[in-house]
Image: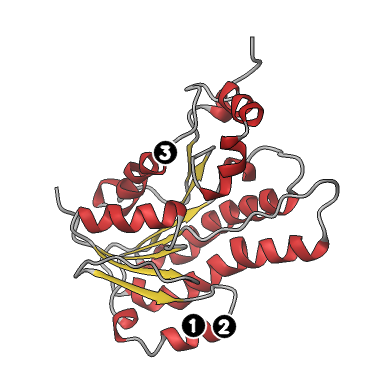
Amino acid sequence: MKLNRRIVITGASSGIGKIACEYFLNIGCEVIGLSRNNLQLSHNNFRSFNCDITNAESFEKLKLEPEAKKRVDTLINCAGLTLPAIGIQSVDDFQQTLDVNLVGAYRVITHFLPNLKESSSGSIINVASIGGITGFGGNPAYGASKAALINLTKSLAVDLSPFGIRVNSVSPGYFRTKMTDKSFKDPYLKKVRENNTILGRFGEPEELMGTFEFLTSVSSSYITGQNIVVDGGWISKGMVQ
């Protein structure tokens, strides 16, 4: 079934963002990909723009692009940063992480709000993390930024409801992406993560797309302010026997 939507996706050049661009193009959507490194996809319904979501000047340049001025039905905030540390994380790394994962996401939302208001069924999807729900050591900035993003989702769901815009977040567990490459390739780290997941494996980015599509479509028209966890059962699992 074709989904006729105009979708903006951040973090489009790699990982979940790249897979999302390809997925939505394949089901009949028009896609605008934003990233610091443009994604090269040969498709009539795809436009890629260089955009640093932490830089206000990037958005001033984006205002000059005709394709970025049109109606937007769905905005998917996939761009993210993680800077794990041994010991206490530096303040600079903490700030940089929040600038991308939280402030950057909010900057994108406010920029495209006029475009979303033009849609009859606007939807915003913020990609959070199980790190925003449970405690993970060695990277407090990532967990704090994602926890704040989940709350931002709930708050904006209230604020944007008068415009018919729904706002939800998706919290992935361990998916096989560039961000998790180190833990996937290390036999010990990989085994620990698999043992903590009910399904006993890493997820593949494609396995997030059904949730994205659902939150994009009219099938989820009565769902807003929610955080949907897609983690193979990580946060539901108790003691390992």
Picture quarter with the C terminus: top right
Rounded to the nearest whole Å, what is the CA distance between mark 1 and mark 3? 31 Å
Rounded to the nearest whole Å, what is the CA distance between mark 2 and mark 3? 33 Å
**Quarter-wise, where is residue 53 in the image?**
bottom right
Look at label 2 and name its amino acid.
Ala
Q: Which residue is mark 2?
A: 56
Q: Position of residue 217 (x, y in %)?
A: 26, 52
| Circle 3 SS class | loop
The residue furthest left is 1
Residue located 61% across and 65% down the image:
100
| Circle 2 SS class | helix
Q: Which residue is mark 3?
A: 204
- Relative to 87, 24 lies left or right: left
Look at label 3 and name its amino acid.
Glu
**Quarter-wise, where is residue 187 in the image?**
top right
Q: Position of residue 4 (x, y in %)?
A: 18, 60
Q: Position of residue 31 (x, y in %)?
A: 29, 66
Between marks 2 and 3 in the image, the one whose residue lies nearer the viewer:
3
Q: Which residue is mark 1?
A: 59
Q: Nearer the viewer, residue 39 or 215?
A: 39
